[in-house]
Amino acid sequence: MTLVLLGCGESVPPPAVTDAPVAVAAPTIADNPLRDAYFGAVHVHTSYSFDAFTNGTISMPADAYAWAKGDPIKGNRAGELLKIVTPLDFYAVSDHAEMMGVFREMGNPDSPMSKHPLAPRITSTDSNVALQAFAEVLRDMSSNKVDPAFTDPAMSKSVWSKIVAAADAAYAPGEFTTFPAFEWSSNPDKRNLHRVVIFGDSKIVPELAFSALDSSDPEQLWNWMDAQRAAGSTLLAIPHKRQCERRPDVLAQRLQRQSAERCTTHGAAHQ
């Protein structure tokens, strides 16, 4: 037998007070908070773009957004159905600002552009004929010799407004994000300086997109973008096909140049 004797009348001293930090268990963090990977495309052309049109594209911006959401669309004149396997999270139709919608109007018998001497070749069902005509226009554009009939601001304004409206119509908050956008397609001396200009939303966008026909100098594009920011717009520019620039990238530190395409593809429904 073991006896334990406690002295009567003796008090137990309180624990010593210390300033040492108390160890606290680290909180459990859920996997991948706010770090989901989102997939989309911002270099996208429809029949409003001269190159896509002459390559047989018939889709409009609304069609392109529907395709990105997973709906099947007719992407070319042959009526071939195109459908993406996995719908995208974000998308931006970014048709060329240069001659925006002009080639498509050549195929509209009610449009004055259908009477242009180049219209029969541009709208030819013979792809070789159409592409040769397109090559001639591109050559003139590279030399800054563009037919004034191709630069009607009223037409460009109308088409740009439809592109913006299509982005708004396709926007589904929390499900599918869209951006108003266009491509500035400078090509001086066949040097590809193309940039996709993307707006954060459509609250404040200019009435006209800035094209390489306004200026082929990237610095002028940056100046125009600065003016849009001063007016309240949120926008940036993303270069693509940078391997084709053929010059040192002297503007790499500019804000507009901080993003670049991971890849670029060309197709009948989108680009």
Image (cartoon, rainbow, N blue to C red):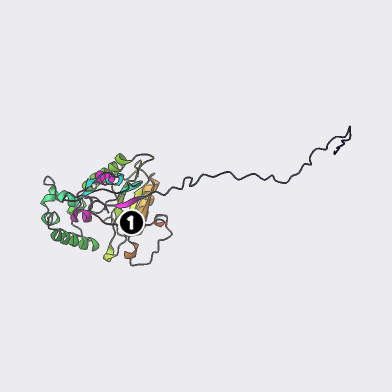
Residue 264 located left or right of residue 129:
right
Secondary structure under badge 1? strand
- Reply yes or no: does residue 41 show up in magenta: yes
Q: As displayed, is residue 269 above or below residue 243? A: above
Residue 150 point in image, percent of width and height:
19, 53
Q: As displayed, is residue 72 above or below residue 248? A: above
Furthest-top residue in this view = 9
Residue 132 located left or right of residue 169:
left
From the image, which quarter does the N terminus lie in? top right
Residue 200 located left or right of residue 267:
right
Q: Which residues are magenta?
A: 40-66
Residue 5 located left or right of residue 214:
right
Q: Nearer the viewer, residue 221 or 80?
A: 80
Q: Residues within 10 Å of mark 1 (few under 14, many from 20)?
A: many
Q: Nearer the viewer, residue 218 or 69?
A: 69
Residue 170 point in image, percent of width and height:
30, 41
At a point 22% along the width and 56% down the height, the residue shown is 51
Residue hosting label 1:
195
From the image, which quarter does the C terminus lie in? bottom left
Residue 17 point in image, percent of width and height:
77, 41
Residue 70 point in image, percent of width and height:
29, 45
At a point 20% along the width and 62% down the height, the residue shown is 140
Q: Nearer the viewer, residue 241 or 11?
A: 11
Task: Specify the amino acid type for callout 1.
Answer: Arg
